[in-house]
Image: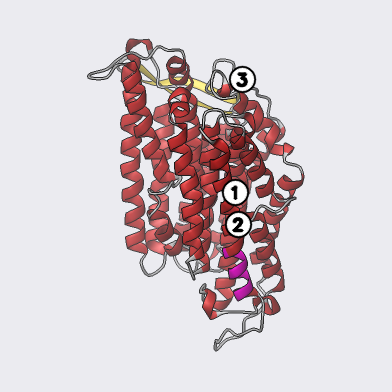
């Protein structure tokens, strides 16, 4: 079937149409057109018939298309797209968040709207490509394609230090791509003549099947370690994992709120998705052999990100640093190599995408009304913006991992799975430190909520702060409903995730 191509084509066509549209119509036109890929992704969800993992031999891929479109030496470059239980939830997350982010852009974006909305849709198309491409060359085109609209969205529509933040984002992520590229091509060259395409399933199965030989000064074992380290370092920047995280707070603080929603909700998932596909699928034995070190990076990200958030006074910066902490749980879950941890880490990607998007959107709504994000500048916002504050508070509880929220289901699975891990030495201790991160998260979120939302209203302005309009609150309500839905019924996504994740455990861990 060509559903993936249809979704991609309609998104690209929508971006082109919106670029040419008059500014005054661009926002609503972009939102209306973004519903088409959203409906397409939901159609694929309801008609999803696949099993196993798309990169492994027994994987049955849904909505797959494959044909050769270019011969490069011995390698066939293929148009190869398809979905499994890992990529489909991320595809739906992308289309849902993009549509809601476009609605949330109607108020704050008041100049060059057609260019802004066109770039947002162009970025959506590239993200869809990242989560559906199954050929490395094709995947890399989409991977790099995400950077261009994000650079301009931060650099043109961002805050006072937008140019610095945009250049820093581009330099970090481009260097990371180069490092990752070196790592993967070490594998490709190591496979020699046995590899005739750059298909991700072909590379994964050849490496896992022991076909990797030596190359240059490396024997097979050294080459696998070399490739793993370079790919891990490249993807760790995108996640971001501490200490590769310093580009993220600047990008979030300077980016317009709708761009921050996509940056935290989807862009960071590119890193963890790539780690899962490349490092933990192709080189699972190397990952297991270095499990303690990788788990250490995960726990460090949880604790350090939470402590940095605790020290912030800007609501947006608090949410930005808390994202680093939340992504640490994903790293810990992936490296534990147990069914619960693998499934929980993947579920956390979806849950964090929804909750972080909701948190950034709520901060944006408050900023639209008050023109400040500083904790010390406002209090008693619950009196003026009760609906926004109520949803913001619920989102914060979701971040803390309260029951009946998606964050609870994800974190419980990660903790159970990492506690059971047999590849992490002293796994209970790593898990205990990671769980301590929840306490810190609760501390800084409750502190910020108490200062800004409750008490006597005290914001000093020469204008009246009133409740947000319906079009600003509605996206928040929809996201909150999705967070609760996945918290109450996690099997909606978890069953298909588990089906695609379980085959990765063969021969490693539990």
Residue tagged 3: 60
Q: Residue at x 38, y 54 (%)?
A: 247
Determine contact: label 2, label 1, CB under 8 Å.
yes
Q: Is residue 377 magenta?
A: no
Residue tagged 1: 435
> Residue 234: x and y, percent?
37, 39
Residue tagged 2: 439
How much space separates mark 2 and mark 1, taking CA atoms? 7 Å
> Residue 282: x and y, percent?
46, 24
* Mark sitting earlier along the chain (3/2): 3
- For the view shown, which residue lies furthest in the bottom direction? 462
Q: Residues within 10 Å of mark 2 (few under 14, many from 20)?
A: few
55 versus 490 height, above or below:
above
Determine contact: label 3, label 2, CB under 8 Å.
no
Front residue of 180/117: it is 180
> Which region is colored magenta?
444-451
* Mark sitting earlier along the chain (1/3): 3
**SS assignment for the magenta stretch, majority:** helix
Q: Is residue 282 visible?
A: no
Q: Residues within 10 Å of mark 3 (few under 14, many from 20)?
A: some
How much space separates mark 1 and mark 3, taking CA atoms? 36 Å
> Residue 98: x and y, percent?
57, 51
């Amino acid at each position: 079937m060509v559903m993936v191509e249809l979704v991609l084509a309609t998104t690209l066509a929508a971006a082109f149409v919106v670029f040419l549209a008059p500014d005054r119509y661009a926002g609503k036109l972009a939102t209306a057109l973004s519903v088409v890929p959203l409906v397409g992704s939901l159609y694929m969800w309801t008609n999803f018939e696949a099993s196993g993992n798309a990169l492994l031999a027994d994987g049955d891929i849904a909505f797959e298309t494959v044909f050769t479109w270019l011969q490069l030496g011995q390698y066939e470059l293929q148009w190869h797209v398809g979905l499994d239980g890992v990529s489909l939830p991320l595809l739906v997350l992308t289309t849902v968040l993009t549509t809601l982010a476009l609605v949330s852009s109607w108020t704050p974006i008041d100049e060059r709207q057609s260019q802004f909305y066109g770039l947002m849709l162009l970025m959506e198309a590239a993200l869809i490509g990242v989560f559906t491409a199954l050929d490395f060359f094709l995947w890399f085109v989409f991977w790099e394609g995400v950077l261009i609209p994000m650079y301009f969205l931060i650099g043109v529509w961002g805050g006072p230090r937008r140019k610095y933040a945009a250049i820093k984002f581009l330099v970090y992520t481009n260097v990371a791509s180069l490092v990752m590229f070196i790592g993967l091509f070490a594998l490709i060259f190591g496979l020699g003549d046995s590899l005739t395409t750059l298909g991700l399933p072909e590379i994964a199965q050849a490496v896992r099947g022991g076909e990797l030989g030596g190359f240059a000064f490396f024997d097979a074992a050294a080459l696998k370690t070399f490739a793993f380290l370079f790919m891990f370092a490249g993807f760790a920047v995108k996640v971001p994992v501490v200490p590769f995280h310093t580009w993220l707070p600047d990008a979030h603080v300077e980016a317009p709120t709708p761009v921050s929603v996509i940056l935290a909700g989807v862009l960071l998932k590119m890193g963890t998705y790539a780690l899962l596909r490349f490092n933990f699928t192709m080189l699972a034995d190397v990952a297991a052999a270095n499990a303690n070190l990788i788990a250490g990076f995960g726990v460090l990200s949880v604790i350090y990100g939470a402590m940095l958030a605790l020290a912030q006074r800007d609501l947006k910066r608090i949410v930005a640093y808390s994202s680093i902490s939340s992504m640490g749980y994903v790293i810990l879950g992936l490296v534990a190599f147990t069914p619960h941890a693998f499934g929980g880490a993947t579920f956390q990607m979806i849950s964090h995408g929804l909750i972080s998007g909701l948190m950034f959107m709520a901060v944006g709504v408050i900023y639209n009304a008050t023109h400040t994000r500083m904790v010390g500048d406002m209090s008693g916002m619950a009196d003026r913006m009760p609906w926004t504050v109520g949803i913001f508070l619920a989102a914060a509880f979701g971040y803390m991992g309260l029951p009946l929220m998606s964050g609870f289901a994800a974190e419980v699975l990660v903790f159970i799975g990492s506690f059971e891990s047999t590849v992490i030495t002293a796994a209970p201790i790593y898990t205990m430190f990671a769980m301590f991160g929840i306490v810190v998260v609760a501390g800084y979120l409750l502190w910020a909520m108490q200062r800004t939302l409750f008490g006597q209203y005290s914001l000093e302005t020469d204008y009246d702060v009133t409740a947000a309009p319906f079009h600003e609150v509605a996206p928040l309500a929809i996201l909150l409903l999705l967070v609760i839905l996945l918290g109450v019924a996690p099997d909606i996504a978890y069953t298909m995730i588990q089906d695609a994740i379980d085959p990765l455990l063969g021969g490693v861990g539990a």
